[in-house]
């Protein structure tokens, strides 16, 4: 009888030890759970600009002392807000305008806000000394790019205007006796002007992601 009780006590001790060991390992066995599946997707925005009318603008029969203004509307055809710029992308034509000095006046505005005004256009492209000695007010060349509008919403329309006037003092100058406005190029070759091969002032309306500048 004594041996049997010892056996029972021994078995009970093993059971208690196993129970304590399992308790130390934490809960075990079956449990409830649930899972919900998700995904990440999206759409791409777009930057797109278009002219509402024609982008080809014309000054007609320009005369000294008479300002002319031409305008163009643009629209955000993309899906995202965008900044809008005007870029004068032909360096030869831009220099031809800035070579006019005090013989040409030029203005740029967008949505009623003046962006550029100059009656003394000179970028020193011919190596001419600085303008300060020629005009107390200095000279202001038209730059390559100007921001027309910030954060233009999709579907919204803006307007850019260009104004030009041949100076009154140009009366009697041979170049105002008909012909194209702003012939170019005007670079010197061996001390003599080259023969112009084109005329006018090419430009681009450029849309960029908000906060970005147009590339060169």
Image (cartoon, rainbow, N blue to C red):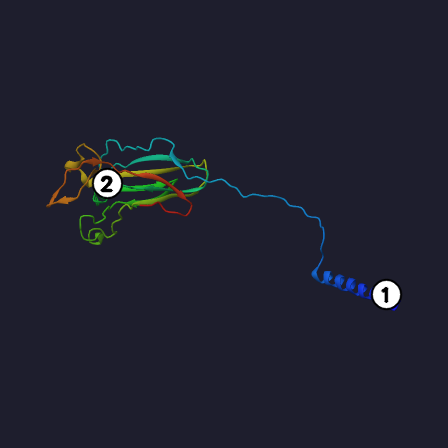
Left or right position of 99 against 158: left
Seen in the picture, residue 164 relative to 31 is either above or below; the reply is: above
Q: Which residue: 78% across, 62% down? A: 15
- Where is mark 2, residue-wise? 93
Quarter residue 160 falls in: top left
Task: Identify the residue position indicated by label 1 in the image.
Answer: 4
Q: How many marks?
A: 2
Q: Earlier in the sequence, mark 1 or mark 2?
A: 1
Give the quarter of the image for residue 207: top left
Q: Is residue 128 above or below residue 44?
A: below
Q: Is residue 170 left or right of residue 72?
A: left
> What residue is shown at x 32% (from left), y 39% (from top)?
204
Q: Nearer the viewer, mark 1 or mark 2?
A: 1
The image position of residue 205, as x and y in percent, is 35, 39
What is the x, y in percent for residue 195? 14, 38
Residue 45, placed above or below residue 137: above
Up-down relation of residue 15 to residue 89 (above or below): below
Which residue is at the far right?
Answer: 1
- Give the camera-side residue of 10 and 116: 10
Where is residue 171 shown, x and y percent of the image? Answer: 17, 37
Q: Give neighbour class at mark 2: few <14, some 14-19, many 20+ (Cα, 10 Å).
A: many
Q: Position of residue 173 (x, y in %)?
A: 15, 38
Image-quadrant location for residue 95? top left
Which quarter of the rendered picture does the N terminus lie within? bottom right
Image side of residue 138 versus residue 113, left or right: left
Categorize mark 1 by other alpha carbons within 10 Å: few (<14), some (14-19), many (20+): few
Helix, strand, or loop for circle 2?
helix
Secondary element under disc 1, as helix, strand or loop, is helix
Q: Nearer the viewer, residue 131 or 11?
A: 11
Specify the label residue 20 is tagged with.
none
């Amino acid at each position: 009888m004594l041996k049997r009780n010892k056996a029972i006590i021994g078995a009970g001790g093993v059971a208690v030890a196993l129970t304590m060991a399992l308790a130390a390992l934490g809960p075990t066995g079956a449990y409830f759970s649930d899972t919900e599946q998700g995904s990440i997707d999206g759409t791409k925005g777009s930057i797109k600009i278009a002219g509402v009318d024609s982008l080809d603008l014309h000054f007609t029969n320009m005369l000294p002392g008479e300002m002319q203004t031409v305008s163009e509307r643009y629209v955000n055809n993309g899906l995202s807000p965008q900044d809008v710029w005007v870029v004068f992308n032909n360096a030869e034509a831009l220099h031809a305008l800035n070579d006019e000095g005090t013989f040409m006046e030029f203005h740029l505005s967008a949505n009623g806000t003046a962006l550029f005004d100059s009656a003394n256009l000179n970028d020193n492209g011919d190596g001419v000394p600085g303008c300060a000695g020629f005009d107390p007010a200095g000279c202001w060349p038209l730059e390559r790019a100007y921001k027309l509008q910030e954060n233009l919403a999709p579907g919204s329309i803006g307007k850019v205007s260009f104004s030009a006037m041949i100076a009154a003092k140009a009366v009697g100058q041979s170049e105002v006796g008909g012909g194209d406005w702003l012939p170019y190029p005007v670079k010197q070759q061996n001390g003599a002007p080259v023969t112009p091969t084109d005329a006018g002032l090419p430009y681009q309306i450029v849309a960029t992601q908000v906060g970005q500048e147009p590339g060169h």
